Amino acid sequence: MLHKVEELLHVVCPSCSRIIDPTPNGCIAMRCAHCSKAFCWCCFQLAPSGDAHAHAMSEHGSYFPPLAYVAAWHRRMRWLGLTALLGKRLDPADRASALEAIGAVPLLASHRLWPLPETAPAPPMRIDAFSEAYPPTIRLVLADDGLDALQAALDAGEDIDSLDDRGMSALMHASHAGKRAAVELLLRGGADASLLDVHSCGALSYACREGHFCIAGLLVRACTDRGAVGLLHEIAANRVLPFLAAKLRTAAGVGPLFDAIVRLGASICDDAGSSSRAPPWELGGGSSRAARRALSMRMLSDTSLPGPHCYYGWTALTWAAHCGALPQLQALVGWLRRCRSSSAADGALEGGGRTPPFAIDSPVESSPLGAAWREGHMRLFDWLLAELTTREGWARELRHAAIKEMLTGQWLGHV
Ligand SMILES: [Zn+2]
Ligand SMILES: [Zn+2]
C-alpha cells in the first residue's frame, strides 16, 4: 500500500503512465518520450493534434507558468490519484487513518497533501493570480498588446534581463513564443542573448527548438556583435548544431542560420591566438587558445539532439551527410580542420557518433560516410572520401577500397 502511494506521487504520462522527470527542461507543452503523445504538463489533458502549445497558451496563458502554479496543478493530480486509490466509499476520517496506519504522512506532507484535503484542490485555469511571480518585462512580453508598455517600462529603468523563477529572461520567453517584434525590441534595448536558465537553455535553443529560425538568426547576429563566446557556449551546451543539421532537409530558413553559426565557430578558431575580446569569465575554461578550440570541438562532436525522440548519437557532421547537405558539410569539415590535426579530422569523418571514431573498422552506423552511403548521396560520399588523407601506412586507394567494402558489407548485411 505504501509503495502504491509513493508511485502515484510521481508525475506520469496521461497516456502510457510512464514516470516523467519532474523538472523537465522546456515548456508545459509536453511530449512523452515513450509513447510520443502530446499533453499539457499542468492539467494533463492529451493534445489530439500532437502539439499542446496552443492549449498551453489559450487555456493557461503561458508556455512557462510560474513554478508555484505548476506545483498547484500537480498537487491536484496527486490528490485525484490518491483518492482513487483509497476508494470513493471511505469518508475523510477513514482515509486519514488508513494513510496514517501505513506511514504515508511524511510523504504526503512533503507534497502539501497532509492534512489530506477533503475536496480536490482546484487551482485557477489561467496563471493570472500567479503572474506576480514574473518580473514586469516578462508579463509584458506575454501580454498580446504589451510592446508599448514594455518599451515604457524599459525607458523607466526596468531591468531588461530580470529573471523569473525558472531563470528565464523576457528574451527567452519571447524567443520561445516566436514573438519577433518583442525580440527585436529587447535586443535593441541591450538584452543579453547569451543568458542561460536553470536548465542551461538560452534564447537561442528555445528559438531553435520551436522552429523560429528567423529569431534565432537575430540572436546570433546580436551575440556576434557583442562577442560571441557566450553564444558558442550555448550552442555547445544545448547541441544546437546537430539539431539544426538534422533539420536541414525539412525546415526552410535553417540553412542560413546553420551556415552563420559555422562561420562564427570557424572565425573563433581562426583568431584563437589573438587576444580575446570576451571577458575571461565567459569562457569557462579560461581564455586560452586551447579552451576555445576545446569548445569548438565540443560543438562539432556532440552527438545527441535536444528533444526526447532524437537520441541517435549523431554528430552535426553525420546529420549533414544524412541530409545530403554538401555545402554545410564542407563548412563543418573546414571548421574541423581548423580545430584539429588532419588525422583526428579524418577519424571524425569516418566514425563520429558515440563510437570511438578513430579506427577504420569502427561501426559505421553513425559515421558521416555511412550516412551518406546509406542515403545514396554519392557525390557527398565521394567528396568525403577525397577529403580523407592517408594514415597509418595505408595507401589512399587501398584505404578507400576498404571503406567501400566495409560499407557494402555492412549495408548489404542489413537488407
Ligand atoms: Zn507516454
Ligand atoms: Zn493544460
Image (tube, helix red, strand yellow):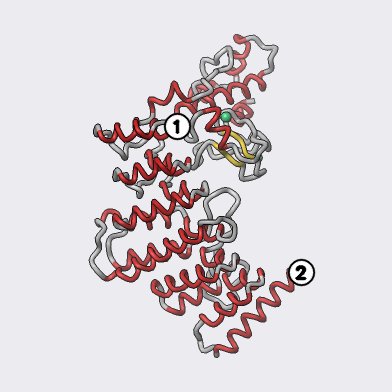
What is the crowding at mark 2: few (fewer than 14 residues within 10 Å), some, or many (at least 20)? Answer: few
* Residue toward you, 99 or 49: 49
> Is residue 283 something that shows in the picture?
no
In the rendered image of this protein, does residue 342 appear above or below residue 62? below
* Residue toward you, 397 or 207: 207
Name the kind of residue labelled 2 in the image: Val
Q: Secondary structure at mark 2?
A: loop
The quadrant of the image that shows the C terminus is bottom right
In the rendered image of this protein, does residue 201 appear above or below residue 158? below
Give x and y (percent) for residue 242. Answer: 51, 59
Name the kind of residue labelled 1 in the image: Asp
Quadrant in which residue 48 is drawn: top right
Mark 1 vs 2, N-terminal side: 1
Give x and y (percent) for residue 1. Answer: 65, 25
> Is residue 1 something that shows in the picture?
yes
Q: Is residue 367 left or right of residue 109?
A: right
Quadrant in which residue 29 is drawn: top right
Circle 2 is placed at which residue position?
A: 415
Circle 1 is placed at which residue position?
A: 144
Which residue corresponds to the image point at 57% horizontal and 39% vertical from the top-left? 30
Q: Ligand 1 is found in which quarter of the picture? A: top right
Give x and y (percent) for residue 148. Answer: 35, 33
Give x and y (percent) for residue 15. Answer: 68, 36
Q: Is residue 165 left or right of residue 22?
A: left
Q: Nearer the viewer, mark 1 or mark 2?
A: 1
Which residue corresponds to the image point at 48% horizontal and 64% vertical from the top-left? 301
In the rendered image of this protein, does residue 384 appear above or below residue 94? below
What is the crowding at mark 1: few (fewer than 14 residues within 10 Å), some, or many (at least 20)? Answer: few
In the rendered image of this protein, does residue 294 appear above or below residue 125? below
Q: Secondary structure at mark 1?
A: loop
Which residue corresponds to the image point at 61% horizontal and 26% vertical from the top-left? 5
